Image (spheres, grey):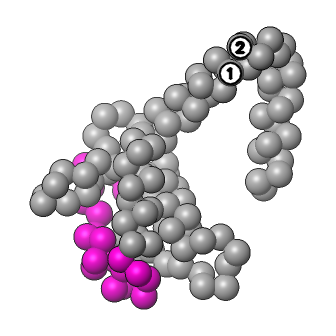
């Protein structure tokens, strides 16, 4: 799997990399258990700072998309579909907040739809 970063993009490089990994996991180009390049190797390949790649990996790990195994490296999570798990967790958190605020389901769904439209 090859990754790339568009230096002219308004999206930060770590976010470009993070989204490429998420997309590759989602569409099956990166299978559960697949090993990702080391932070240093990927930083060298992409011409990025090591900290930039490390941030992307850290955020992917926090989202459950990848899992760090110490010196063994970083691997695509094997505990089910990590993208679906992360999406369900976010949806559950949002539903809890909407309920605490006393927002109707229709109003909550409309808020999500508006938020998604601003990101397309």
Q: Which mark is residue 48?
A: none
Q: Quadrant of the N terminus?
A: bottom left
For label 1, the crowd category at 10 Å Cα-Cα, with few meaning under 14, some 14 to 19 and many 20 or more, is few
The reply to whether the magenta stretch includes residue 99 is no
Q: Which mark is residue 100?
A: 2
Counting from the top left corner in percent of width and height, residue 101 is at 77, 16
Residue 32 appearing in the image: no
Q: Residue at x 28, y 40 (%)?
A: 78
Counting from the top left corner in percent of width and height, residue 82 is at 42, 40
Q: Is residue 4 above or below residue 119?
A: below
Q: Is residue 31 above or below residue 99?
A: below
Q: Find the residue positioned furthest to the left.
A: 71
The reply to whether the magenta stretch includes residue 49 is yes
Q: Is residue 20 above or below residue 101?
A: below
Residue 39 appearing in the image: yes
Q: Quadrant of residue 21?
A: bottom left
Secondary structure under tag 1 reads helix
Task: Please provide the residue range marked out in magenta.
Answer: 28-50
Q: Which mark is residue 97?
A: 1
| Image marks 2 and 1: residues in contact by CB distance under 8 Å | yes
Counting from the top left corner in percent of width and height, residue 81 is at 41, 37
Q: Residue at x 77, y 54 (%)?
A: 119
Seen from the viewer's position, the closer of residues 29 and 74 is 74
Question: Is residue 75 shown left or right of residue 56?
Answer: left
Q: How many marks?
A: 2
Q: Residue at x 16, y 55 (%)?
A: 70
Separation of marks 2 and 1 at Cα, in angstroms: 5 Å
Secondary structure under tag 2 reads helix
């Amino acid at each position: 799997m090859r990754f790339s970063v568009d230096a002219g993009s308004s999206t930060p490089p770590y976010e470009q990399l993070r989204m490429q990994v998420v997309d590759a996991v989602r569409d099956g180009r990166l299978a559960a258990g697949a090993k990702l390049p080391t932070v240093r190797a990927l930083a060298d390949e992409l011409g990025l700072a090591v900290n930039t790649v490390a941030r992307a990996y850290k955020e992917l790990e926090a989202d459950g998309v990848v899992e760090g195994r110490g010196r063994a490296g970083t691997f695509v999570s094997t505990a089910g579909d990590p993208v679906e798990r992360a999406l369900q967790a976010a949806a559950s958190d949002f539903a809890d907040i909407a309920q605490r605020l006393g927002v109707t389901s229709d109003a909550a769904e409309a808020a999500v739809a508006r938020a998604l439209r601003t990101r397309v």
